[in-house]
Image (cartoon, grey):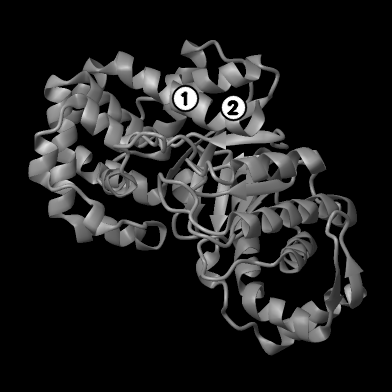
Amino acid sequence: MLIEKYSFGTGDRFGKEGRAQLAAIQEINKMGVNVVPVWNKSNREHSIVHTTPNDVAAEAEAAVKENAYSGKYYIDADHIGMATVDKFINASNFFTIDVAHFIGQSADAAEREAFVKNHSKYLGKFTIPGIDQSFDVTETFLTHVADNYLNALKEVKTIYDHIASKKGAANFIPEVSMDECEIAQTPLELFFILAELNRLGVEVQTIAPKFTGLFAKGVDYQGNVAQFTLEFEQDVAVTQFAIKELGLPSSLKLSVHSGSDKFAIYPAMKKAIEKFDAGIHVKTAGTTWLEEVIGLAQGGGEGLTIAKEIYAKSMDRFDELTGPYATVLNIEKDKLPSVTEVNAWTSKLFSDALTHNQSCIDYNPSFRQVVHVGYKIAVEMGSRYMTALDTYREVIEKNVKYNLLERHLKLLFN
């Protein structure tokens, strides 16, 4: 099983938007770009929303049938480790193996020495096509790589072998996630990470490295765009070189996590993948849950009441809801409107504040991030929220499709 060149993660917390998400994918396909959907949902989200991986699979299957879609699609076991992987085995065919918390653990002395020996053929001057500089590979450097990444890569191997033993190695897409750590991997480090995965027998197809800058939830990239552009292009060069040099799967590509709404860096990503004729996977694209709340607000009546209540209760429980996402939020509290102020808003004002339209004077990224983490409030509303999603179905589906197609897919591929 090899994943297609272009793939988009279509997360959907409440399982209602699969049809609209797939419609957006089908539209970009009609334009001649073969993008495949990857429905993703993490164990944390399942536990909060009270769903299972089988629910995600069922949603995808229903959307495929209703939309008469004949292309490939995938169900992602998002950010799994050994403690959670078995819950996803039957329903998933794409596994995001997250080992970021193993990064930086010093390697055993003997294993460190073996790592240096195993990759000693690259000692000295080293060049990678597409990168306009040569690298000095020393034993000290390889020791540094081993100390930072070897334990993480061993854990990847353990989880990969476990999945393969259950599903068969040819029946799933393995992704390695190393992005939720403190320091970005250099292009040279990325090459040796891939080289060691290859030596271990892990046929990684997508890899999510850490990039500099802040990839905050639901808002634009915050950081040095020029620096990201250089890093991303060099990492793409590494993946393409690794395919030829190491014999890794031809489908190997970069994965950008928390990639939704990163409009400032989409042009750089588009340019790099075109330059190297490379693939890409963008995870959590589309911020579907926020499009639901926007649709409720636009619908007025009970929909607007629910949207305002989600914000009010999210503000009441601010620390509880933002805490788990603290490293991927950049909320300026002094920019947040009061609950009293929001309760007086019209449908349009609420929608404008929440919609990621940077040309709109009322757009408020801090407000947007608070609502983004407030999905637990919607869960607690139970049938009231789910009924509203049905009541305002037309406007919500219109928003979900437009957001994914016009703001994401077309920017990267059209």
Q: Amino acid at mark 1?
A: Gln
Q: Residue 413: percent from the left, percent from the top?
A: 65, 30
Q: Looking at the picture, how far across and down is residue 14, in whole percent?
A: 32, 33
- Identify the residue shown where x is 41% and y is 57%: 328
Query: What residue did someone put label 1 on?
Result: 21
Tell me where residue 396 sits by quadrant.
Answer: top left
Specify the label residue 375 is tagged with: none
Q: Residues within 10 Å of mark 2 (few under 14, many from 20)?
A: some
Where is residue 125 drawn, in percent x and y?
92, 74
- Identify the residue shown where x is 11% and y is 45%: 339
124 and 194: which one is in front? 124
Pair 1/2: label in front: 2
Apparent side of residue 277 relative to residue 298 in the rendered image (left or right): right
Q: Mark 1, residues whose alpha carbon is within 10 Å: few (<14), some, or many (≥20)?
A: many
Say which residue label 2 marks.
410
Nearest the viewer among 405 and 201 is: 405
In the picture as drawn, the residue positioned furthest to the bottom comes out as 109
Residue 220 is situated, as x and y percent measured from the top left of the image, at 46, 46
Relative horizontal placement of residue 338, taking residue 34 as reference (left or right): left
Q: Amino acid at mark 2?
A: Lys
